Image (cartoon, grey):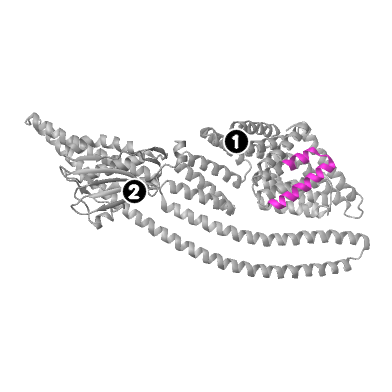
């Protein structure tokens, strides 16, 4: 911390001390010595607050609470405002925002109407900071503008820099990026003029935030480094931990994940010294986000759960709600749908609790308003007593006023409670509807799991058969190699090769299906000629078709352009051609065609093979897969057609089937054509 900053803090507190001391030293009576002793103790605590705040906000809370009791016992309004201010600042640093807001509101209630002083400006700046955090945008604007007005009247550039900083962040939150940039730049220029380290650090942090918003991460990193350096030189432990956490977020956005993790570990080390569990929860949440991004799902779950535990202990319902939502996303990505559903339910429950919390807080704010008004009346009563020496009349008047206010508040509360009960009834009905929807989703998940279990059972059976065949041939070769002729050995190895090829095709399909289910398949639509693609597929399968004496026909000459992902369309067409060859007997014919139909491309693959009945057609593209045997004893599971359906959906298309037993089948794939604009782009 710079010497200039230390001297300035001491001078401010000495000025408060001088202001407070005048009326107290003028007092007379038997308690004069006791008042002087209390005053001296209160001033010592005030003098120590800036340094204690930098080292340990938790200790600052304890010391300031003691000082507040002394100031109140002395009826010392300026000191009471100062201790309320420091208690608010300490709790804000410790992330106890509602407690912080209560203290700063109390300080505002004690300020004289239209007060123009550095103390008043600091109070309004801190109030604005709290209101930004609590989402009270309109109140924050009013508080910060009051601070600006006082700062301009006093020509206090440090006060103005702080106010401009928070007005800039308020505009950033409200997405007024241009205004945010203007005010934060003003704050930074004033900080350069005063060379006040706290203002410089705050401006650097806010410049980093704006740079990250514009995705200028390298520039943001430099501003964050500047803030860290300044906070370190000041000895500002809370500010340093906050700057490190912001820098870690910066590094995460730059994809420097290990550096971000290392920086968070350093921030956590400093944060532990603050003894603020809610601040620790923020660090663990950022760890969780990084590990989720890296797909280290177990590490992400552990860190989010640590954050959830700390927020739960401290009653942070908003934090628990956001953490529950994050855990639901992680478990969903990990395919742990049971836990994902549980945390999704918890998120909904906590969201509803936040509504109740808002209603309760509105009631408490009403009581706080009443408390502030009571304090103001108390000050008035004390002033009148010193002038008129008539305690009885003033007390009676205050009793009447308070009774009227109490009756008014009670009537308002009764109306509010009635409205709240009606709202709760409506909310309960919504919750019941949501529960019914969740039960429906749960039933659908159970059905999907049963279908998948059935599919895997069939696949396991079809995998076992090829392996049994391979093991049988290889065992025979090992045991009777010397007795087998070259022709028999050649026949066995050809059989092993054929079985292995079919097994590899099945495994490829299974792997591709798994990629589709987990969302790990690349999908890049573009404009291209499907006519040329069909020619290439026919050339590829010509030899296989000839082996079964099957004729492949494709006579379309028109160039048809699709707007789709070429690789996934190729998977569809290859599977359909393979199936046509599989279920077409020798000397059969397979015809391919493509034409434009209702602004779509209709690609048809027709065969004169074994065909299917209506019952089989209805299960082709579902999880109810079943093993099938082709005209050449080829094996299949139905997984290929399920993949075709998935790929068609990816490309915003569909597959139609028409078939008659013993009269062949026709599969028609409908896919989007290339528009003129897409054709030019391609």
List x then y, in percent, for residue 456: 29, 49
Q: Nearer the viewer, mark 1 or mark 2?
A: 2
Would residue 450 be found to the left or right of residue 15 on screen?
left
The residue sitting at 25% across, 42% down in the picture is 578
Of residue 154 and residue 96, the one placed in the foreground of this image is 154
Q: Is residue 369 magenta?
A: no
Query: Disc 1 or 2, which lies upstream in sequence?
Result: 1
**Quadrant location of the C terminus in the rendered image:** top left
Query: Residue 361: where, in percent of width, then height?
Result: 66, 59
Residue 148 is inside the magenta segment: yes
Give the overall secondary structure of the magenta segment. helix
Q: Nearer the viewer, residue 565 or 43?
A: 565
Q: Is residue 277 shown left or right of residue 168?
A: left
- SS of the residue at dot 1? helix
- How busy is the neighbourhood of tag 1: few (under 14 within 10 Å), some, or many (20 plus)? many
Residue designated by label 2? 645
Mark 1, residue position: 247
Query: Which stretch appears magenta?
Result: 137-164
**Which one is in front, 305 or 455?**
455
What count of labels does the image hold? 2
The secondary structure type at the circle numbered 2 is helix
Q: Residues within 10 Å of mark 2 (few under 14, many from 20)?
A: some
């Amino acid at each position: 911390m710079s010497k200039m900053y230390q001297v300035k803090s001491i001078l401010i507190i000495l000025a408060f001390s001088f202001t407070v001391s005048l009326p107290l030293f003028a007092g007379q009576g038997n308690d004069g010595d006791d008042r002087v002793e209390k005053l001296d103790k209160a001033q010592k605590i005030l003098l120590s607050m800036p340094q204690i705040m930098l080292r340990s906000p938790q200790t600052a809370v304890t010391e300031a609470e003691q000082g507040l009791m002394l100031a109140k016992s002395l009826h010392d309004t300026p000191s009471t405002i100062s201790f309320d201010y420091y208690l608010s600042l300490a709790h804000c640093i410790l992330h106890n925002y509602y407690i912080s807001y209560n203290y700063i509101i109390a300080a505002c209630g004690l300020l004289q109407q239209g007060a123009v002083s550095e103390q008043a400006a600091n109070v309004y700046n801190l109030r604005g900071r709290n209101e930004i955090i609590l989402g009270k945008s309109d109140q924050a604007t009013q508080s910060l503008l009051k601070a600006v007005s006082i700062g301009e009247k006093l020509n206090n550039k440090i006060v103005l820099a702080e106010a401009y900083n928070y007005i800039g962040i308020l505009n950033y939150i409200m997405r007024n990026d241009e205004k945010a940039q203007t005010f934060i730049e003003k704050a930074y220029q004033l900080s350069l003029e005063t060379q006040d380290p706290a203002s410089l650090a705050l401006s650097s942090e806010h410049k980093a935030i704006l740079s990250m918003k514009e995705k200028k991460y390298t520039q943001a990193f430099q501003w964050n480094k500047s803030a860290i350096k300044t906070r370190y030189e000041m000895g500002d432990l809370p500010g340093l931990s906050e700057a490190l956490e912001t820098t870690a977020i910066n590094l995460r956005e730059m994809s420097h994940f290990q550096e971000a993790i290392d920086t968070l570990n350093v921030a956590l080390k400093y944060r532990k010294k603050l003894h603020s569990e809610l601040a620790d929860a923020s660090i663990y949440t950022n760890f969780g986000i990084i590990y989720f991004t890296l797909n280290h799902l177990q590490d992400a779950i552990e860190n989010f759960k640590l954050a959830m535990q700390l927020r739960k202990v401290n009653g942070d319902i908003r934090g628990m709600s956001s953490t529950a939502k994050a855990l639901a996303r992680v478990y969903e990505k990990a395919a742990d749908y049971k836990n994902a559903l549980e945390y999704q339910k918890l998120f909904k429950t906590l969201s509803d609790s936040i509504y109740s919390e808002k209603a309760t807080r509105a009631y408490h704010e009403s009581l706080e308003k009443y408390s502030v008004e009571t304090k103001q009346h108390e000050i008035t009563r004390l002033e009148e007593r010193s002038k008129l020496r008539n305690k009885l009349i003033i007390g009676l008047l205050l009793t009447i006023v308070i009774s009227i206010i109490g009756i008014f508040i009670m009537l308002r509360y009764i109306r509010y409670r009635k409205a709240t009960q009606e709202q709760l009834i409506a909310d309960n009905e919504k919750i019941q509807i949501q529960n019914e929807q969740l039960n429906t989703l749960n039933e659908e998940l159970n059905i999907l799991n049963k279908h998948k279990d059935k599919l895997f059972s069939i696949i396991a059976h079809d995998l076992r058969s090829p392996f049994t065949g391979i093991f049988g041939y290889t065992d025979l070769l090992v045991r009777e190699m010397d007795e087998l002729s070259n022709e028999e050995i050649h026949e066995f190895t050809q059989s092993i090769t054929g079985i292995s090829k079919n097994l590899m095709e099945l495994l490829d399909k299974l792997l591709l299906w798994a990629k589709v289910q987990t969302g790990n398949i690349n999908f890049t639509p573009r404009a291209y000629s499907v006519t040329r693609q069909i020619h290439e597929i026919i050339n590829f399968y010509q030899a296989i078709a000839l082996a079964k004496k099957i004729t492949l026909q494709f006579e379309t000459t028109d160039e048809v352009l699709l707007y789709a992902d070429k690789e996934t369309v190729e998977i569809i067409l290859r599977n359909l051609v393979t199936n046509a060859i599989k279920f077409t007997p020798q000397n059969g014919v397979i015809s391919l065609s493509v034409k434009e139909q209702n602004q779509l491309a209709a690609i048809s693959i027709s065969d004169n093979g074994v065909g299917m009945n209506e019952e089989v057609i209805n299960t082709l593209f579902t999880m109810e897969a079943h093993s099938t045997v082709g005209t050449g004893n080829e094996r299949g599971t139905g997984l290929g057609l399920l993949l075709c359906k998935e790929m068609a959906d990816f490309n915003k298309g569909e597959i139609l089937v028409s078939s008659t037993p013993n009269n062949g089948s026709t599969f028609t794939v409908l896919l989007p054509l290339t528009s003129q604009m897409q054709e030019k782009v391609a």
